[in-house]
Amino acid sequence: MSELLSETALDQLFREARTFNAWLPKPVSDEQLHQLYDLAKFGPTSANSSPMRVVFVKSKEAKEKLSPFMSEGNRAKTMAAPVTAIVGTDHEFYEKLPQLFPHADARSWFAGNQPHIDTTAFRNGSLQGAYLIMAARAVGLDCGPMSGFDNAGVDAAFFAGTSVKSNFLINIGYGDASRDLFPRSPRLSFDEACRIA
């Protein structure tokens, strides 16, 4: 049986974690990116479909390539972040199902059924992007997830010739709590958001 995480761990993952807009000038290593993906990949997806594909934008050249596609309000913070993860969704994820779900012919559940492909890809790729955020927090990194970019431009620049489409972006690094950190916004109570049937 699993044990409840410590209060410190729960604070780091949920209660004290914030969406950062400013970043300390501290690099994020390739090893840390491998580490956070190697945690995130274990989050559940339908039929282990695992449609998320990620480009970790780190280099000056890659940041300059990304910059024109950012909305005005997101450009500066994205350029300042040590890493920006482009969380994409592979709409041909089902081609990997013989590898990922070998105990059934899961590929046949999707091939030729574009509405089912698109719904499954978007839902599960979004879930995996959330797992990526939690994994980054678990390894001591801060995140700034966002929309506010030209999806078609990003797709042409980073996913050309593939079946991958961008979903959302996550700035990753060490957040600067002294700058541009808004007070925590309210959340809905259990009774406002949930019911037990």
Image: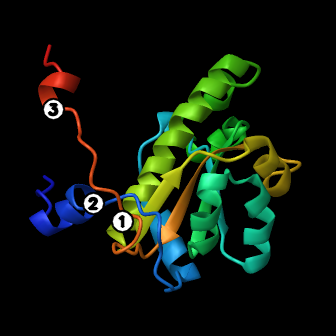
Image: 51 above or below 144: above
User: As drawn, is 166 to the left or to the right of 190?
Assistant: right
Q: Position of residue 105 (x, y in %)?
A: 62, 29
What residue appears at the point 53 percent right and 85 percent down from the top-left corner? 27
Which residue bears the numbered disc 3? 189
Label 1 amino acid?
Arg
Mark nearest the camera among 3 and 2 is 3
Label 2 amino acid?
Leu
What residue appears at the point 25 percent right and 55 percent down from the top-left corner? 14
Q: Which mark is residue 13?
A: 2
**Distance CA(mark 3)–CA(mark 1):** 24 Å
Which residue is outermost to the right?
A: 161
Q: Position of residue 145 (x, y in %)?
A: 49, 53
What element does badge 3 sit on?
A: loop
Give the mark nearer the N terminus: 3 vs 2: 2
What element does badge 2 sit on?
A: helix
Give neighbour class at mark 2: few <14, some 14-19, many 20+ (Cα, 10 Å). many
Give neighbour class at mark 3: few <14, some 14-19, many 20+ (Cα, 10 Å). few
Give the mark nearer the N terminus: 3 vs 1: 1
User: Looking at this view, is 115 or 137 the one in front?
Assistant: 137
Asked whether residue 9 appears in the rendered view, the answer is yes
| Residues at discs 3 and 2 in contact (Cβ within 8 Å) | no
Image: 111 above or below 99: above
Label 3 amino acid?
Ser
Q: Position of residue 121 (x, y in %)?
A: 61, 34
Which residue is outermost to the top?
A: 197
